[in-house]
Each structure stands twice: as structure tokens, then as C-alpha cells.
Image: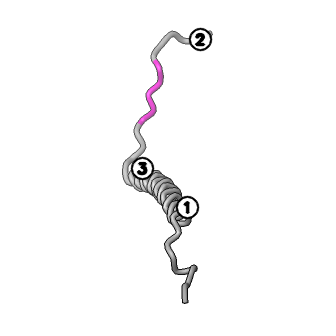
């Protein structure tokens, strides 16, 4: 007895291949976005801790003409 549901289907194979390519691209974009967010958060935390340890630098004023 023939089982048609077990036969190879070239159309389904092509459709699944395309779907897998799209899913891989979406996964890559999502992971790259997460990496950017982690890097930004790391920079922000590093800046906060570094600024807490270092004394604030004196603010330099411009030594131009005085306004009247």
C-alpha cells in the first residue's frame, strides 16, 4: 500500500528552505540588536562607576571678552 504522505515533496522542501533562510536572517538581526544593547549598557555602567571614582574635573571657562 502506498503512503503518499511519506513521499518527497519538492514544493514543501523549497518552502521550508526559504522559511529557514528567513528565520536565520531574523535570528541574526535579533542577536546583533541584543549585542548592541548589551554593549551600550556596559559602556553606561562603566562610565557611571568611573565617574564615581574619579574626582570631577574643574570646569574651564572661556577666557574671551567680558560682556557688558
Label 1 crowding class (10 Å Cα cut-off): few <14, some 14-19, many 20+? Answer: few
The residue under the point 52% across, 58% down is 18
Q: Secondary structure at mark 1?
A: helix
Point out residue 36 in the picture as x, y percentages from the top left corner. Answer: 46, 52
> Which residue carries the number 2 mark?
67
Query: Which of marks 3 and 1 precedes in the sequence?
Result: 1
Residue 54 shows which numbered tag? none
> Which residue carries the number 1 mark?
15
Determine whether label 1 and label 2 are within 8 Å by CB. no
Left or right: 68 in relation to 33? right
Residue 46 lies in what quarter of the image? Answer: bottom left
Q: Does residue 59 belong to the magenta stretch?
A: yes
Left or right: 68 in relation to 17? right
Rendered position, 38 above or below 7: above
Query: Which of marks 2 and 1 precedes in the sequence?
Result: 1
Residue 51 shows which numbered tag? 3
Front residue of 11/26: it is 11
Label 3 crowding class (10 Å Cα cut-off): few <14, some 14-19, many 20+? Answer: few
Q: Main secondary structure of the magenta part?
A: loop
- Pick the quarter of the image with the N terminus: bottom right
Point out residue 49 in the picture as x, y percentages from the top left corner. Answer: 41, 56
Point out residue 24 in the picture as x, y percentages from the top left corner. Answer: 47, 59
Q: Which residues fall within the magenta stretch?
A: 58-62
Query: Which of marks 3 and 2 precedes in the sequence?
Result: 3
Q: Secondary structure at mark 2?
A: loop
Front residue of 46/29: it is 29
Rendered position, 48 above or below 2: above
Rendered position, 62 above or below 5: above
Front residue of 48/56: it is 48
Label 2 crowding class (10 Å Cα cut-off): few <14, some 14-19, many 20+? Answer: few
Amino acid at each position: 500500500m502506498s503512503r503518499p504522505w511519506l513521499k518527497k515533496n519538492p514544493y514543501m522542501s523549497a518552502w521550508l528552505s526559504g522559511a529557514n533562510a528567513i528565520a536565520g536572517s531574523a535570528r541574526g538581526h535579533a542577536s546583533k540588536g541584543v549585542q548592541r544593547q548589551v554593549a551600550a549598557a556596559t559602556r553606561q555602567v562603566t562610565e557611571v562607576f568611573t565617574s564615581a571614582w574619579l574626582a570631577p574635573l574643574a570646569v574651564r571657562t572661556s577666557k574671551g571678552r567680558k560682556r557688558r
